[in-house]
Image (cartoon, rainbow, N blue to C red):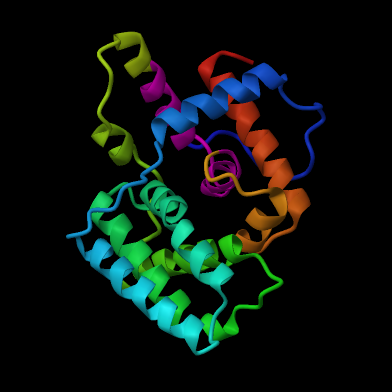
Amino acid sequence: MLLNETSDAPSAHEGLPRHIQAMIGQKLDELFPKIIEVDANSRLGQVLLRLQAALLDAQVEGQVSSGFSEALIAAVPRLRRFAHMRTGNASEADDMVQATLLKAWEHRARFQADTNLIAWLFTILRNTHLNHRKRHWREVEDIDGAFAASLSQPPDQEHRIGLSELQAALNGLTPEHRETLLLVTVDGLVYEEAALVLGCQPGTVKSRVSRARERLALALGVA
């Protein structure tokens, strides 16, 4: 059941204390760890090898800059993390990243050097995932704990319960508030970048993040 969130208008409160915001951010990092290494023998690994070679050729021909090539490859860990949070499945997430990289390559001429590459890539991935769900006649899945359940947990029972409670609290948020919170708090997008991805105003992003943090803090009993 969703928590009672009816508006993105600014909260009457100034926001949670810094130490509570930091604690929530730390717990979210534990729930959705970074995924750095890519198996060179996997489909995504093979795509990366071919993409890197194609980017080098494109640089020689003046089609792309070295900065674009480096930033595109450097974005892969962030794209994988974002995809994992959306799909809850490692294989599907890497498929989403692969599709995103291929679309970015195909439409490289459309990217403007003075615009935000991360926001552009996240928008491609998000739209790819949404379109994939629509094609299969299914609603976009909320985060249902599948990813959290697949994480290797440390032996400390109290720690496990903490992550389980956090996942349950996340599930209680509206999809809009949850996605916005994760984009900013976990993926590290600034308000303006997240606004570009979500197609809304930065003020709306800020309000959603503030409300989502407050709801999580209440649900976890730390407010």
Task: Specify whether 195 is left or right of 77.
Answer: right
Q: Residue at x 42, y 77 (%)?
A: 56
In the orientation shown, which residue stands out farthest toward the front? 60
- Front in this rendered view, residue 95 or 44: 44
Q: Is residue 221 visible?
A: yes
- Name the quadrant containing residue 199: bottom right
Figure check: 184 above or below 119? above
Task: Specify whether 92 is left or right of 184.
Answer: left
* Residue 89 horizontal/vertical position (percent): 27, 49
In the orientation shown, which residue stands out farthest toward the bottom? 61
**Image quadrant containing the N terminus:** top left
Figure check: 170 above or below 155? below
Residues shaded magenta: 162-185
- Front in this rendered view, residue 71 or 26: 71
- Front in this rendered view, residue 83 or 138: 83
Figure check: 157 above or below 47? above
Q: Residue at x 58, y 41 (%)?
A: 181
180 inside magenta stretch: yes
Figure check: 132 above or below 16? below
Instruction: Label the magenta part by its dominant secondary structure.
Output: helix
